[in-house]
Structure formats: C-alpha cells, structure tokens
Amino acid sequence: MKKKKTIKQGLILSLLILIIIIFAIIYLCSPSFQLRKKGYQSNEITLIEKNLTDKEISNLIKSNHKTPIKDLEKQPLFQRKKLSSYVTFDQSYPNHKANQIVKAVNLNLHKQKGFDIKKLDRYLSFYQTYQNLDIKYIISLVNQNIDRLEIKDPDFLLSVITEKYYIENRLPRYLQYHDTHPTFKVSIVVRHVNANADYEYYTNTTPSNPNDQLLILANKYTYLDANYKPNDLVTVEGDFMVRKEVKDAYQKMSQQAQQEGLSFHMNSAYRSYQSQQQVYREYQQKFGQAYADKYASRPGYSEHQTGLAIDITTRRVRFNSFDETEEYQWLQNHAHEYGFILRFPKGLEQITGYSYEPWHYRYVGVEAATKIKQENITLEEYYAYYVNP
Ligand SMILES: [Zn+2]
C-alpha cells in the first residue's frame, strides 16, 4: 500500500517537472524572452509586441543589429503606428540616429525614386529649409547637389520647378540666370535657358546630332559638321535644293495655296557649308564680325545646311515685307499642317537668336510642327523639352 502511494507521488512529481520543462521551453522560445535576451527592456518589448507582426518581430530577433526602440519613442515626431516602418527602415539602413529614422520615415523619403541613404542628412537639412517642397524634389535636388549651391532667392527655386517646361538638369542654370536677370519672369528664365540663350552666342557649342533626323538642330549653339550634306537632296523650283520629304510637303502646301489664289516664291533653300562660309566671310571682310554675326550665320550654324529650311516669299513684295501679304497669313494658319514652322517669330528673338524672319520656314514634320504651333514655342524649346531633355 505504501509502495503504491510512493509510485503515485513519484508520477505526479515527474508530471509536474515535465509540465515545468514544457513551459520553460515555451518561454525560452517565446519572442519576449528572445527580445529580452537581445537587450530590449520590458516597455520596449510591450511596444514591439503590440505594433509589429510576428514576422517583423522574428526579423528583429534574427538581426545582428539592435534597433533603438526606446530612443525612437522619445522623438517628438514619433508615431506609434509607424513603429514597424521605423524598424524596417532601421533594419535596412542600420546605425542611424533615432531622430533621422523618425523624420525619414515620416516623410517617406526612403520610398522616393533616387533615394540614397548616404545623403540622408542632406535631404533632411534641405527639407528643413524648403518644407513647402514636394518630397520628390527634395531627393532630386539634393542628388543634383543643389543644396550645396548658394541659393539667393528660395522663392524663385520654389516657382521654377513647377514651370511647365522645367528641365531638372538645367536647374543650376535657371538659378544662375535668375541671379543675373532678376527682373525676368520665371517662365522667361526657363524659356531662355532651355534655348541655351543664357549663353553668349557661339559659346558652349555642341555638334548637331544627325540621328535627330527631321529635328536636327543648327543654331547659335549647335553646329553641323563641315562635311554634313543630306543624302536625299532634290531640286525644287528651279535650282533650289531641299530634302525629298521637304519637297513633297512644300509642293502639296504650295498647290493648296494656289487653289486659294495665292502663290509662293522660293527665295532660298539648301546652302552648303562652303557657300555659307563665303557669305559670312564677305560680310565679315566688308563690315566686320559684329555685322556678319548679326546678318549671317557662321558656317555650320545655318539651318539652310540641313536641307530642311526654305525662305518663302511672293513675287509681289520684297521678302522683308512678306508678313504684310495674304500668303504670310495663310502660312500662319496652315504651314504646320504640312510640317513647317515659322522658325524665327516676332518677339522671340532672344530665344531663337535671330531677328524676326517672316520668310524663313523650317520643316520638322507634321507632329512636331503642330505641337510647336499649339504651344507657341520655338524649335529650340521643343527640342530641349520633348526630344532631348
Ligand atoms: Zn532662311
């Protein structure tokens, strides 16, 4: 009898021990214990367990790095519901100060395109100055080192970046141009810089890109190679030469105008590098360089070398009063339908670099011509904004 009792007691004891062992194992495996082992304190553990998913907690436990939860909590901008984002941020980019983590996450900086953790401090301090700025600009401007420039007029910066034709990589030039031309409207600053008109003529020049096809540029900042000659030149109206596509478009346009009782007369079309050189030199020798630059393009810089430009007038008037004719009015309304634009419009001299030339038309194709006309911009601006920003 006594023996039986002892066995029973022994069994109960073993069972108790077993239960204790099971609980101990459960406890040792529990996240709380693991977190405690990692050095988190009770109040931190409570916060973690309330706000993080099991997976996030297990990542926290597995990580070599300990997130400073109690420091995060002390930050004035700390938001309890964002704890898991703070932790994820800290786990992805360890070793940042709690205030940096909280600010970066609250602003969603790390989710922006171009975010570079090495620049975190600079983003945050730029934001400090420009709190009205959309966060995507904070990233892109700092990435362009704009925060390292001395910005004299922060309001200008804020307004220029929302201009329609704003091109990000030209911002330093907008800022600089604004400094030297403080009375110019923001839109004018953008237009001039997009057309490179913030530079002196014939400075900062670059070669034209023949791959631009019908949109190839030749202007005071972009030049054609001395050997550049389109390989599809054909004659039109006597001895004038233009590219095949231009001839077709011009003839269609001319026929339509004729049906409406108007008649065009071509005054100039393709000019080779050599012939431009001759004209320029003649002016230069007779009247000096300033005069030559005013009335002729330097060789390579003339659009006539592209085979895409024509001078149109009528027989009835001198070419410089062409804008008083019905033909000119007709072209104003219809040239774009055939792919032509008035290349040097009145009032846009500073943008095109050329005086108003009512007779000079440039073929760019219907799509570009229509857009240029609708938006009332120049080829330079179209090219800078739409073709090669
Ligand atoms: Zn011309």
Image (tube, helix red, strand yellow):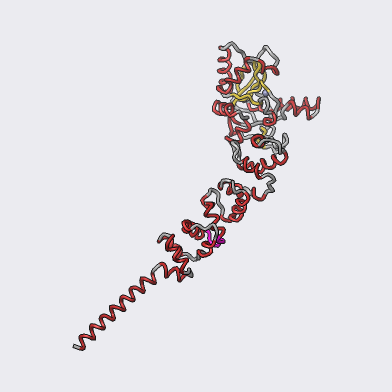
Is residue 97 part of the magenta span, yes or no? Answer: yes
Q: Is residue 127 magenta?
A: no
Query: The magenta stretch spans which residues?
Result: 93-98
Query: Residue 280's image quarter?
Result: top right
User: Could you say where residue 253 lies in the image, as x and y percent from the top left?
Assistant: 57, 18
Farthest residue, direction left: 1
x and y percentages locating residue 43 in the rendered image? 47, 67
Q: How many marks?
A: 0
Q: Quadrant of the N terminus?
A: bottom left
Depth check: 302 or 35 in front?
35
Frontmost residue, 321 versus 132: 132
Indicate left or right for 31 with 338 as reference. left
Residue 245 is at least partly visible in this image: no
Q: Quadrant of residue 156?
A: top right
Above or below for 249 versus 65: above
State the image coordinates of residue 273 (x, y, percent, origin top left).
69, 28
Above-or-below relation of 84 to 265: below
Q: Residue at x 44, y 65 (%)?
A: 46
